Amino acid sequence: MTHLGINSAAATAARGFAVLGYDPDESMVERLDVGRLPIAEPGLPELMAQHRARLSFTANPAALGCCDMVYVAADVPTDDEGKSDLMPIRQLIDKVAGELRGDALMVILCQVPPGFTRALRGVPSERLIYQVETLIFGRAVERAMHPERFIVGLADPAQPLPARYREVLEAFGCPILTMRYESAELAKISINFCLVASIGVANTLAEISETIGADWSEIVPALKLDRRIGPHAYLNPGLGIAGGNLERDLRTVLTLTEGKGVDTRIVTAWLANSAHRKEWCWRVLDQRLLRRNPAARIAVLGLAYKEDTHSTKNSPSLALLAHLAGKAVSVHDPLVPASVVPFARGCTGPLDCAADADALVIATPWPHYRQLAIADLARAMRGRLLIDPYRVLDGRSAVAAGFEYHALGVPTLAPAERDPCRC
């Protein structure tokens, strides 16, 4: 019952199927039984409550013997370099396989490297399926309920899908793409590669925009109207690759191709670009304030790697805070406890966090930070440096209130400078 598992269970129940959620952690099962979710996801509590009659939970693996299909949705842990540890998922698969009845299907939802599924033993290949998951933290309910397509890996894609499995997939009303195991496993990596490429484009050109007086947000609509790029292209500049999945896939490809003569310099370039962009907030803060005032007070809003999640995996905010140990720092996040930054002062709200600060960094674009009034920040803060990479607040209003304003993809705005866009 991971983030992926809980959302998948709720969405499948919402499509009319009886779902049994298994987790070996009895305390987890007890929490789910009474509706206390261990994860934060918009819309998930309501979806679970609405379809609770079709949802049940157990910590007893023997209970899986009643199931027609068992989806394995365990997290695949990664180390600090993004390398996967596949042992826990192998152990879980072995444990569950021993409980399956003779005609039950096993569907692997976990993100695994090519070759993993075909190498599994214990479940006959005609009953073993790999399905690509496309979870997005903060949009997991939307993605689970309305998938764009199902990508399904089979031992032999020429064979028809098992009828029971097809019935479940067709209930979601989207295209079903079948292929061999290895193609499906690589398809997930391919999706993330395209996303990383888009992030690299946006980050590089946004950085150029900052230096030449262009505004990247003005350019993006022109790209999205180009049919070769498309209206849904991911072109938002960010602070490097955060979360865990994208970097894991890049590292997986480096591992898979080691010693095989494949040119993977583009992958190492993406990783280097990500590391460079992750330091953006620190570079601005250091150059514009800390070099001349090392004792400055810093306020950081947001600790999660993105909004609407409690995950801090590869969080740009924590990367910034790693530079600030020993300094006067206050932090706030709606979900992540301040204890993840032992040296910082935890705050009850964003204005409390900004009180007496010389600089404010909005490191995670939580929606309710957009409600902050510039005038309230000006009254609360001692200094006038506002670092807002995702443009949560209005830059021109900030400058009018006396702030020096920094955002990704746009030149610095400051009260003493004339707006280059105005004559």
Image: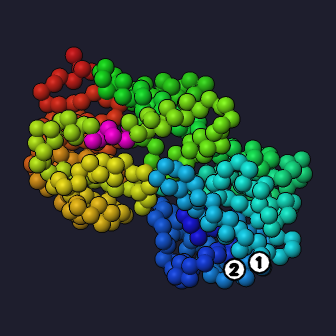
Q: Main secondary structure of the magenta part?
A: helix
Name the quadrant containing residue 402.
top left
User: Label 2: which residue?
Assistant: 61
Using a 10 Å C-alpha cutoff, classify the residue at mark 2 as few (fewer than 14 neighbours), some (14 to 19) or many (20 or more).
some
The residue furthest top is 423
Foreground residue, 356 or 247? 247
Residue 120: where, in percent of width, then height? 77, 60
In the shown orientation, is residue 205 left or right of residue 33?
left
Foreground residue, 34 or 64? 64
Q: Residue 211, relative to residue 184: is it above or below?
A: above
Q: Residue at x 69, y 44 (%)?
A: 186
Using a 10 Å C-alpha cutoff, classify the residue at mark 1 as few (fewer than 14 neighbours), some (14 to 19) or many (20 or more).
some
Q: Residue 301, relative to residue 285: is it above or below?
A: below
User: Label 1: which residue?
Assistant: 99
Residue interval drawn in magenta? 277-282
Foreground residue, 264 or 217? 264
